[in-house]
Image (spheres, grey):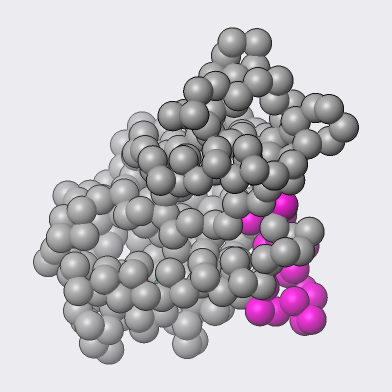
Amino acid sequence: MCYEIRTSLFAIDRITARSSAYAMISGVNYGEIRVARRIGTAFFGVIARPLHKQRSAPYVENAFANFRQSNEVTMALELPALPFDPKALEPHMSANTLSFHHGKHHAAYVNNYNNLTKDSPLATKSLEDVIKESANDSSKAGLFNNGAQVWNHSFFWNCLKPAGGGKPTGQLLSKIHADFGSFEKFVEDFKAAGATQFGSGWAWLVLDKGALKVTKTGNADTPMVHGQTALFTVDVWEHAYYLDYQNRRPDFIAAVLEHLANWDFVADTLAKASRA
Ligand code: ZN
């Protein structure tokens, strides 16, 4: 389940029926409650709305049950559901790869992050805030690595879709032309970044001070801590491709660009970043 955090702190003046742990403010539905806290007689909460319009009934039920039992509630992160059927990306990314990559690796980062933040003030902070605050602090390397890997993987799944890839259109393509010269040059740069990332890491398309750039990061490192907005990524950790491609990392990157890239998501992310 992916959540778009609408705001860091929002006054909640009433909660609707138990079946929907939604925050209602002056009769307007603002989305699901992610974290809620009573301060004095007022409730404050972080409001999130689900991406992909998927419902997460047990999560919502638990959130509401916990909210009723305690004045202060912190919700653990959940492993987001994949935004596609695990078999839908075959043959370019197998269900077997996803069962390990999403079901084991991504899940482990979520569990580790929850264990590291449990019962601490960090549990009330957004994942993004924790990532930014723990970056460049060697005493918080475990927290940063697990938090950033949770974020990077959640972002990566959104960058993929069945029958995707090829060339984007519209504003995204115009911006790629403006900043790289051509789509082909972007593809060449992106493939080179992914192929030359030594060891584990990520290849990215980012927005940096208004311009598109291709970058690569090692291990869990992530664009948000470099003042950049991530627009697209390919995971180049071996766990992302080894079952399907063995050592042929360039073939995996090419397959994602040609068959799986979700340019609609990238275009939406660019549009939001450009408005911010
Ligand atoms: Zn991965």
Instruction: Please give left or right for residue 40 compared with residue 147 in the image.
Output: right
- Residue located 20% across and 53% down the image: 85
Is 16 positioned to the left or the right of 73 in the image? left
Relative to 37, residue 108 above or below: below
Q: Residue at x 22, y 83 (%)?
A: 243
The residue positioned farthest toward the top in the image shown: 27
Q: Which residues are magenta?
A: 124-143
- In the image, 24 versus 6, the foreground residue is 24
Q: Nearer the viewer, residue 113 or 70?
A: 70
Magenta-colored stretch includes residue 137: yes
Image height of 84 relative to 244, above or below: above
State the image coordinates of residue 195 (x, y, percent, origin top left): 39, 79
Residue 179 image offset from top left, x and y in percent = 51, 48
Residue drawn at x 54%, y 57% is: 77
Which quarter of the rendering shows the C terminus? top right
Dominant SS type (magenta): helix
Taking 153 as reference, is 248 left or right? left
Q: Quadrant of residue 274?
A: top right
Which x, y percent locates residue 60?
Answer: 47, 40
Answer whether residue 159 is visible to the viewer in this image: no
Residue at the image position 30 percent from the left and 76 percent from the top:
100
Q: Residue furthest right?
A: 40
Image quarter for residue 189? bottom left
Residue toward you, 71 or 236: 71
Q: Is residue 253 magenta?
A: no
Q: Is residue 96 visible?
A: yes
